[in-house]
Image (spheres, rainbow, N blue to C red):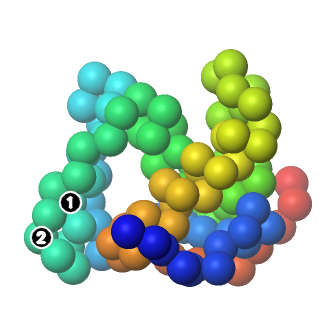
């Protein structure tokens, strides 16, 4: 399946209001209210999910994952973008205005 959202690491996203989620032993379970489907994600994806609970630029997510896990930045960026594009396609995240720099 090819997702063509056009997202880049410079884009900002935030969790949609059309979902509910819970942490289950370090992993996340997400219910998409739009499609009524439960999604379970592993520990790394759950960390990404935690990071998108507020508006965040994707490159900040990539940086956090690189800092916390042993992964090459280019591979991390590709994997994070693919996961966020999937979340976007399922209506679990939406594009957001860039968060102000803190």
53 is higher (above) or lower (below) than 12: above
Compared across the picture, whether 94 is left or right of 43 comes to right
Q: How many other residues sit within 10 Å of disc 2, few (<14), some (14-19) or many (≥20)? A: few
Q: Looking at this view, name the residue that lies furthest to the front.
A: 1
Near mark 1 (Cα within 10 A), the count class, few <14, some 14-19 or many ≥20, is some
**Relative to 1, is 14 on the left or the right?**
right
Mark 2–mark 1 distance (CA, rounded to whole Å): 6 Å
Q: Quadrant of the C terminus?
A: bottom right
- Which residue is rendered at x = 75% and y = 50% of the image? 60
How far across and how far down the image is residue 22, in percent? 27, 44
Q: Is residue 24 above or below residue 63?
A: above
Residue picked out by circle 1: 31
**Where is residue 45 drawn, in percent x and y?**
45, 41
Residue at point 40% right, 75% down? 89
Q: Which residue is mark 2?
A: 36
Which image quadrant is residue 34 in? bottom left
Quadrant where the N terminus is found in the figure? bottom left
Rendering quarter of residue 81 = bottom right
Residue 79 can be seen in this image: yes
Q: Are marks 2 and 1 in contact (CB under 8 Å)?
A: yes
Please tell me the numbered disc located at residue 90. none
Foreground of the two, 16 or 65: 65
Q: Which residue occupies 26% across, 60% down?
A: 20
User: Is 57 on the left-hand or right-hand side of 42?
Assistant: right
Q: What kind of element bears circle 2? A: loop
* Mark 2 or mark 1: whose residue is earlier in sequence: 1
Taking the view exactly as shown, the residue that stands out farthest to the left is: 36
Which percent across, then down, holds residue 44?
Answer: 48, 33
Nearest the viewer among 1 and 46 is 1
User: Which residue is most to the top?
Assistant: 70
Circle 1 sits in a helix, a strand or a loop, which is it? Answer: strand
Report x, y in % for residue 36: 12, 70
């Amino acid at each position: 399946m090819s997702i063509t959202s056009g997202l880049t690491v410079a884009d900002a996203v935030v969790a949609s209001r059309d979902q509910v989620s819970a942490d289950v032993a370090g992993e996340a379970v997400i219910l998409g209210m739009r499609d009524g489907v439960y999604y379970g994600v592993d520990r790394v994806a759950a960390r990404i999910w935690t990071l998108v609970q507020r508006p965040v630029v994707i490159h900040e997510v990539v940086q956090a994952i690189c800092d916390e896990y042993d992964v090459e930045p280019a591979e991390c960026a590709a994997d994070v973008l693919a996961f966020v594009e999937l979340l976007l396609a399922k209506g679990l995240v939406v594009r957001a205005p860039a968060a102000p720099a803190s």
